[in-house]
Image (tube, helix red, strand yellow):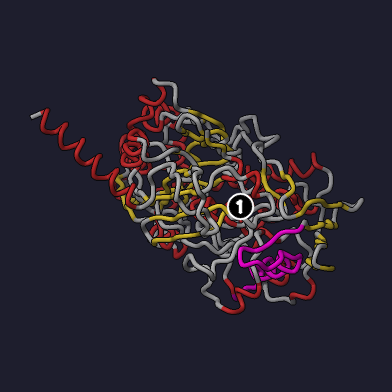
Amino acid sequence: MIKNKKFLLLTVLAVFSLVLAACGFGGDKSDNSSSSDGKKDSGSKTKELNLAIASEPPSLHPGLAEDTTSSAILINVFEGLTVSDADGKPTPGIAEDWKISDDKKTYTFKLRDAKWSNGDPVVAGDFEYAWKWALNPENLSAYASIFYPIKGAKDYHNGGSADGVGIKAEDDKTLVVTLENPTPYFLELTGFKTYLPINPKVTEANEEWYADAGENYVTNGPYKLSEWKHSDSIVLTKNEDYWDAANVDVDTVNIAMIEKEPTVATNFKSGSLDYIGKPFQTVDLNVIDEFKKDGSLKIKDEASIYWYKFNTKDKIMSNANIRKALTLAIDRQTLIDNVTKGEQKPATGMVPPAIPNFTEDRGYFKDNDVDGAKAALEAGMKELGIKDPKDIKVNISYNTSEGHAAIAQYIQEEWSKKLGISSELDNSEWQVYIDKLKTGDYQIGRMGWVADYLDAYTFLEMFDTAKNGNNQTGWENAQYKELLDKAVAEVDEAKRLEYLKQAEAIGMTEFPVAPIYYYTNLSVVKDGIENLNPNPTGDIHLKDVKMK
């Protein structure tokens, strides 16, 4: 019987490998293979990298994308003014140089000679067009607020005039950006996905240009989107017209869409995939110990957090004491030791210690504070007129993932054992899940947040108002917002830091979210591949990857 099971497993693996090979996921190709420009590459090998993502990217439009899966593709087919390096610091991209005014409010970018994949020159006006497109309230960009450091941007997005926005293409090679206040992380923003350029001619000709691969999907990055089989696979090929194409080593990147982490792990071990890890797919919990034992697992701190969001518009979740009770009752260290196993750090704040000046524990609450949780629960029940914890039933929502399911099951048991609260688990495919959070069709929902830039503001800003597209909790607080506004306007960095920590303290009094852990990035990579690892903000720039 055991022999038959083993034979069945080998058969399944063989068949799956054939499927991957048929999709072009088979490694190096030689002799008469085609290069990315369609010409025969006689006698040479093309280097192929095989990756997997968990789901269909929700949007491959820079102005509409709001998730890490879409971003992982976008930053490799487009290029912004700057590009983040291995440490998350900005380096020259399409901007070969820039000058900053003495008051640190005006940035003058000089663009290098670069082309779009359709042959058009990349000009400063392409950036002005793309940024104002995202700010236009009619276009419903969830990340429009990331432009708010720019003068007039917030006013335009809230119904004002585009004429007052401090973005101006002085000529084809010069982009001048004027800020409301000095913004120490602005050069990091200019490499972020929403700051990527789009080609106005293509966009104006076809508003659905970004829906499929093909001649309409015009990009300016190191790779082109050559193939997109929706809900199945994506193929990127080297862009020979990219300004730095000579230093791009990998010719083809095959990206399969594989939802289940165990399947991804199986295919990595069989050689069909070259890498598992963020920002693509995650390492299956069941093989972490195996990869640790053979020394192949890489663990790296990341500027990101895993938390549970509370829908504060829900009757039960509207109560801050109930939210506090649920937050304090979780034993995070045991969760990490026995479930996630990735050496994550218990999260007791909203800002990860990978962010500069937030390395210390700010002391908002302690992990696994059962007595504190019970006291908060009692206070919350009294406020809501509930006499028995058994009368509280909550719903834990998460997107399809073995890891998210295991975490939800653990927390479900914690709340039942320590507080007597029952909960049901609600699993949905990613796009359906995101829609639930956006529309408020949930009580408690898991979410991760990776730093858009290496500053605490990226973790706090989303809760400035209930209308913020990334908030999704319905929570807002006037004092919290006032502190963030002060931080934005403050030139003195020490005072600015204090305002941010005071805002975080309010968040950790009212608990719109329950912080669970600060992420580490777990990854495994095939031998012979270099520079395939994420930077602190979770990005991988495939142009830097080298294959032997």
The structure residue drawn at horizontal position 33% and vertical position 47%, both measured from the top left corner, is 21
Which secondary structure, mark 1?
loop
Q: Name the residue tied to disc 1.
A: 222
Q: Is residue 447 magenta?
A: no
Q: Nearer the viewer, residue 235 or 293?
A: 235
Q: Would you place residue 58 above or below residue 326 in this image? A: below
Image coordinates for residue 339, horizontal then vertical, percent: 37, 31
Q: Quadrant of residue 163?
A: bottom right
The structure residue drawn at horizontal position 61% and vertical position 78%, both measured from the top left corner, is 204
Type of amino acid at the residue the image marks with label 1: Pro
Q: Nearer the viewer, residue 5 or 184?
A: 5
Q: Residue furthest front?
A: 42
Q: Is residue 114 magenta?
A: yes
Q: Residue furthest bottom?
A: 205
Image coordinates for residue 19, horizontal then vertical, percent: 29, 49
Q: The magenta stretch spans which residues?
A: 113-138
Image coordinates for residue 371, horizontal then vertical, percent: 44, 31
